[in-house]
């Protein structure tokens, strides 16, 4: 029998606890021997992951995909078909998809999980209903999606797909993440079914960026169309032309030119006072155009707002920024993970020993330049004028002291930076943050850090909403209340401009009608206020003073240091607001938070 020593006889508590652990281990071995329990090596349980897709299977295998807007998904479908793949874009997830997701998924998952997983199950169930056997469905289809890790459920999506598919009767159905492609080749020794090469990257990049440009153009023109439905008809025709060009691998420039002319024929009236509403939040929830976010973009437009959407290109630029930031930080570390260095001589997740840092940074710079260049080329061809992709360095700089750039997950610091940018630079009248119920990264940002931003700027109209597929009426009601404030703000801003000129609303409309260029669908007034009508009236006033003012603005913008000076003004404004906040609440403990903004 083991005698337990008292702690008084030990030099330290640590030694005492170690002795207890040793006694327990000895007792465990004695009992196993007495009960004749054989020692067995424990093996970690792993979920089976069927993901083999080889070149031999390419001819009879259809690649299913979905997850972005309908424009993106259709263009990706046609781009893959143009490369020789059988591809099919699934429908935008709807309420029925949510029901399938809840039926076959785990409990406690977030909204995007239920919608996207359920959408795949719904598609396979429909194929079965149409007469295809389960064996043929599993054999002749794969689903390709993005994947990652991080402090949220997104890292477990692929496991959730497999669980739901297994319970729905489709065990063995292949779900491929992009980063699994190399693993397929190594495991089978055969050529990959989906070739991850420069041609695929370039073609898919074109498809995604074109989807961005079409969407940006649509949301810019549609709120001001004179003939209801004209923009949607032009979008349908644009999708048909562009998809045919991708599938045939020719005629893309012609399709874009025809699309530009089609959009140009839409009659618009930008004298309508519509509050501009920026949508930010969790990537999928703010991007989807279906029931996953209560079709919020359409709802806002029906309520008389202009929607400022976030583009997928913004997310790509954020990923490139994060890789650059991490590379620069890791380059300062010493040492190397030897186990990894022995295999690929690529350093480790911590340090960058044996890695060409300069080359990696150069490649990231090339990637960023490629995205921005392709975007601006397509924007120029389609007539999307004066659209600026976000400067990720600036977004990181203005948000860092509120939300540390090293914290990742979801949109990271971008949500904070976007709200600051929207408020300080009067970019919009209202900011709407959409995230799934229980989204860990986004909820922490919107419900936590953003409260300080609204304290610094009490006039900011900011509304965070959580989506779960239910309760649309409650969400709409909350949005309508804040939208009423935003509309009042836009009307007040325009009225002040009218009073300064001693104009009535009819006078303003007559001034615009006298300048045909201002009524063109593609025309964009220079930024002067939070809504388009205010931009337009400042445009009219400036033209009366100097017909060539736009040329002067263009030249001034290209002066050395002009952009840097404007960005510094934003940073100075944030710090000034923080000081005012600190002075107002100097006797309250939470005012110390603002000190971090103005002090190193």
Image (cartoon, helix red, strand yellow):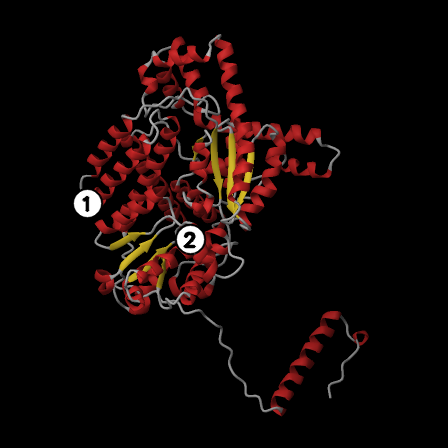
Question: In this orientation, does residue 247 appear?
Answer: yes
Reply above or below: 132 against 229.
Answer: below
Q: Residue furthest right?
A: 8
Left or right: where does residue 489 sit relative to residue 189? right
**Which element is circle 1 on?**
loop
Judging by the rendered image, the residue that carries numbered circle 1 is 249
Which of the image's four quarters has the N terminus?
A: bottom right
Residue 418 spot, x, y in % from top left: 50, 36
Left or right: where does residue 163 sit relative to residue 466? left
Estimate how packed mark 1 is, as few (under 14), some (14 to 19) or many (20 or more) residues with alpha carbons within 10 Å: some
Q: Nearer the viewer, residue 339 or 264?
A: 264
Reply above or below: 93 against 495.
Answer: below
Residue 588 spot, x, y in % from top left: 74, 36
Question: In this orientation, does residue 354 appear?
Answer: no
Reply above or below: 271 against 182.
Answer: above
Which of the image's four quarters has the C terminus?
A: top right
Q: Which mark is residue 96?
A: 2
- Residue 24, picture quadrant: bottom right
Q: Nearer the viewer, residue 517 or 411?
A: 517
């Amino acid at each position: 029998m083991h005698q337990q020593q008292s702690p008084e006889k030990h030099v330290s508590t640590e030694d005492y606890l170690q002795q207890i652990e040793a006694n327990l281990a000895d007792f465990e071995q004695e009992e196993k021997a007495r009960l004749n329990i054989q020692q067995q090596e424990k093996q970690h349980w792993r979920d089976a992951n069927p993901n083999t897709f080889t070149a031999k299977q390419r001819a009879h295998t259809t690649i299913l995909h979905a997850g972005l807007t309908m424009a993106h998904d259709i263009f990706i479908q046609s781009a893959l078909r143009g490369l020789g793949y059988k591809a099919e874009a699934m429908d935008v997830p709807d309420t029925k998809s949510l029901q399938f997701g809840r039926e076959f998924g785990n409990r406690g998952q977030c909204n995007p999980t239920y919608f996207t997983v359920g959408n795949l199950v719904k598609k396979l169930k429909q194929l079965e209903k149409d007469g295809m056997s389960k064996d043929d469905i599993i054999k002749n289809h794969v689903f390709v999606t993005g994947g990652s890790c991080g402090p949220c459920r997104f890292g477990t999506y692929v496991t959730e797909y497999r669980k739901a598919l297994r319970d729905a009767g489709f065990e063995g159905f292949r779900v491929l993440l992009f980063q699994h492609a190399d693993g397929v080749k190594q495991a089978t020794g055969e050529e990959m079914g989906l070739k991850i090469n420069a041609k695929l990257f370039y073609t898919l990049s074109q498809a995604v960026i074109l989807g961005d440009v079409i969407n940006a153009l649509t949301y810019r023109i549609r709120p001001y169309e004179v003939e209801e439905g004209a923009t949607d008809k032009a979008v349908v025709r644009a999708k048909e032309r562009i998809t045919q060009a991708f599938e045939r691998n020719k005629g893309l420039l012609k399709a874009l030119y025809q699309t530009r002319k089609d959009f140009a024929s839409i009659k618009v009236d930008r004298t309508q006072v519509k509050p501009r509403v920026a949508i930010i939040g969790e990537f999928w929830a703010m991007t989807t155009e279906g029931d996953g976010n209560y079709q919020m973009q359409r709802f806002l437009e029906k309520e008389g707002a202009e929607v400022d959407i976030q583009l997928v290109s913004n997310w790509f630029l954020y990923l490139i920024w994060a890789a650059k930031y991490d590379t620069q930080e890791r380059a300062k570390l010493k040492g190397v993970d030897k186990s990894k260095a022995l295999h690929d001589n690529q350093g480790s997740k911590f340090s960058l020993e044996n890695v060409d840092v300069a080359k990696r940074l150069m490649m990231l710079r090339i990637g960023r330049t490629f995205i921005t260049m392709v975007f601006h080329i397509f924007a120029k061809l389609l007539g999307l004028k004066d659209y600026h992709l976000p400067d990720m360095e600036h977004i990181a700089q203005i948000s860092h002291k509120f939300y540390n750039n090293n914290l990742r997950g979801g949109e990271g610091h971008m949500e904070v930076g976007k709200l600051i940018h929207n408020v300080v630079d009067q970019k919009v009248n209202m900011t709407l943050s959409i995230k799934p119920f229980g989204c860990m990264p986004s909820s922490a940002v919107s419900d936590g850090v953003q409260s300080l931003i609204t304290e610094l700027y009490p006039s900011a109209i900011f509304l965070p909403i959580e989506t779960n597929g239910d309760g649309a009426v409650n969400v709409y009601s909350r949005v309508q209340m804040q939208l009423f404030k935003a509309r009042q703000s836009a009307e007040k801003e325009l009225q002040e401009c009218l009073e300064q000129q001693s104009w009535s609303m009819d006078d303003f409309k007559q001034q615009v009608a006298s300048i045909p260029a201002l009524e063109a669908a593609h025309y964009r007034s220079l930024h002067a206020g939070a809504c388009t009508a205010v931009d337009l009236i400042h445009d009219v006033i400036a033209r009366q003073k100097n017909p060539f003012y736009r040329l002067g603005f263009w030249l001034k913008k290209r002066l050395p240091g002009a952009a840097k000076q404007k960005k510094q003004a934003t940073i100075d404004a944030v710090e000034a607001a923080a000081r005012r906040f600190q002075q107002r609440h100097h006797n309250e403990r939470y005012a110390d938070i603002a000190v971090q903004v103005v002090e190193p």
